[in-house]
Image (cartoon, grey):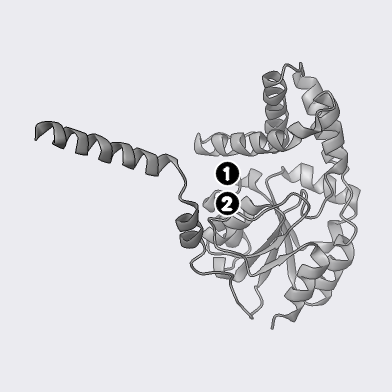
Amino acid sequence: MKNNRRNFIKNTALLGMAGASIPNFGFAATSGNESGTQSITTRPKVLFFDVNETLLDLTTMKKSVGEVLGGRSELLPLWFTTMLQYSLVSTVGRQYNDFGIIGAAALQMVAANHGIKVTEEDAQKAILGPIRSLPAHPEVKAALQQLKDGGYKLVSFTNSSNKGVKTQFENAGLLDYFDERLSIEDIGKFKPHSDAYDWAARKMNVKPSECLLVAAHGWDIAGAIWAGWRGAFISRPGAQLYPLAPKPEINESNLTLVTKKLLALK
């Protein structure tokens, strides 16, 4: 009887460990999306825009990073996720470094893990130079102008530094489209930390429910929605929504299509 009891406890413990380590895809997907896609017809008071990839085309920077990695373009997604991971490590550890500097450090880490030697200077040169002169995606300027003409307040909200995004907007010709530029540099906590979204809403003197984030990153949209914001996802090539987060009310392939739906709101 004691042996049977030991076996029962052992098997129960193993089952619990398995449940914790193996995703239950069907259940998780259902619970994460219980509310389904939001269906809201009222206009948000402020439109917040992520910058890199959402508004600006990263092709040039991806090319320079790929060259530093010896032409191994397949490592680019790993580099970006490592950069995002260590921005969150810094936030959790109550530290702050410029997002570009974290990106350069992540580039050195990925290179080292694949037998590629990249100096700190080479890594920073590959990122900090190109990222400041990225062009806007082709549809962005016309769409932003339509939103401004339609009465929306436009605010950029980025993990990049204040100086960095100002330089980016100057070089891309986007400065005049925005009423305000917000950088997490001023709070020292990277998106998607909820405190970052709360801070941005306070800065604009609006409630979280009156904010809508336009972004091409699933993690950014998830963070915004979890903070009580609304969301519009731009599904740029390679971008995906996080399946365990509620779906945003808008999901389109470019800013023109997102703009059309935003302008239809009353």
Q: Residue furthest bottom?
A: 266
- Pinpoint residue 163: horizontal percent, then vertical percent: 77, 43
Q: Secondary structure at mark 2?
A: helix
Q: Nearer the viewer, residue 116 or 225?
A: 116
Dot 1 falls on a residue whose secondary structure is loop
Residue 207 visible within the image:
no
Query: Disc 1 designates what residue?
Result: 189
**Quarter holding the C terminus?**
bottom right
Is residue 38 visible from the viewing direction of this image? yes
User: Is residue 251 placed above or below 103 in the rendered structure?
Assistant: below
Left or right: residue 232 compared with residue 151: left
Q: Are marks 2 and 1 in contact (CB under 8 Å)?
A: yes
Distance between the alpha carbons at the discs numbered 2 and 1: 6 Å
Percent of width and height locating residue 241: 64, 56
In the image, what residue occupies the spot 69% across and 19% down? 112
Q: From what the image shows, is residue 125 above or below residue 29?
A: above
Residue closer to the observer: 33 or 223: 33
Q: Which residue is mark 2?
A: 196
Q: Earlier in the sequence, mark 2 or mark 1?
A: 1
Q: Residues within 10 Å of mark 2 (few under 14, many from 20)?
A: many
